[in-house]
Image (spheres, rainbow, N blue to C red):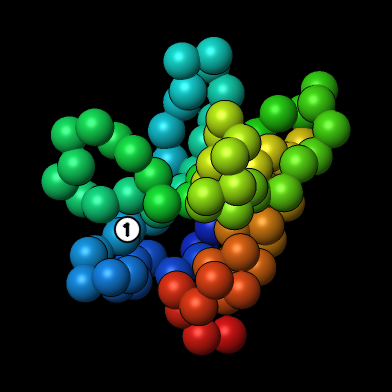
Amino acid sequence: MNKVELLPKEFYYKNDLYQIAMWVTMFGRLCIGYRKPLDVNHKSLCSVCVEPKNDPCDIKEPGSGWLNEGIGNTKTLDDACDMLNKYIVKQGYIKD
């Protein structure tokens, strides 16, 4: 079984529905995260980019002042799934 299949498909946060999504960034990298299904701006609540050549970086907390708040990166898709799951549980978006 792929780890993507184990992630929650959707959850509510502040009365808004967020669903799992996967996309390619403008830099050609695979990204997985949670977005509002009808948000035309495609802003994600949290996401992780798969960047095999870069060192992993945890998801930055919202309000941290970092350029890429809510975004992390890992070397593999499975690691990205693990990071997302850990983050959404820590933030209380879902229960473990």
- The residue lying toward the viewer, choosing from 23 and 65, is 65
Q: Position of residue 32 (x, y in %)?
A: 50, 44
Residue at the location (54% across, 14% down)? 27
Residue 21 vs 30, above or below: the answer is below
Q: Position of residue 14 (x, y in %)?
A: 28, 70
Q: For residue 44, what is the image quadrant? A: top left
Please identify the quadrant where the C terminus is shown. Answer: bottom right
> Would you say 35 lies left or right of 17 here?
right
Residue at the location (52% across, 51% down)? 62
Q: Position of residue 12 (x, y in %)?
A: 29, 72
Please identify the quadrant where the N terminus is shown. Answer: bottom right
Query: Regarding mark 1 in the picture, which secondary structure is present there?
Result: strand
Q: Is residue 17 visible?
A: yes
Q: For residue 77, what is the image quadrant? A: top right
Q: Is residue 2 visible?
A: no
* View extreme (bottom): residue: 95
- The residue lying toward the viewer, choosing from 61 and 13, is 61
Q: Position of residue 41 (x, y in %)?
A: 24, 32
Amino acid type, mark 1: Gln
Residue 23 vs 86, above or below: the answer is above
Residue at the location (54% across, 71% down)? 91
> Would you say 70 lies left or right of 20 here?
right
In this figure, which residue is indicated by the disc labeled 1? 19
Q: Residues within 10 Å of mark 1 (few under 14, many from 20)?
A: some
Residue at the location (19% across, 42% down)? 39
> Would you say 28 lies left or right of 9 here?
right
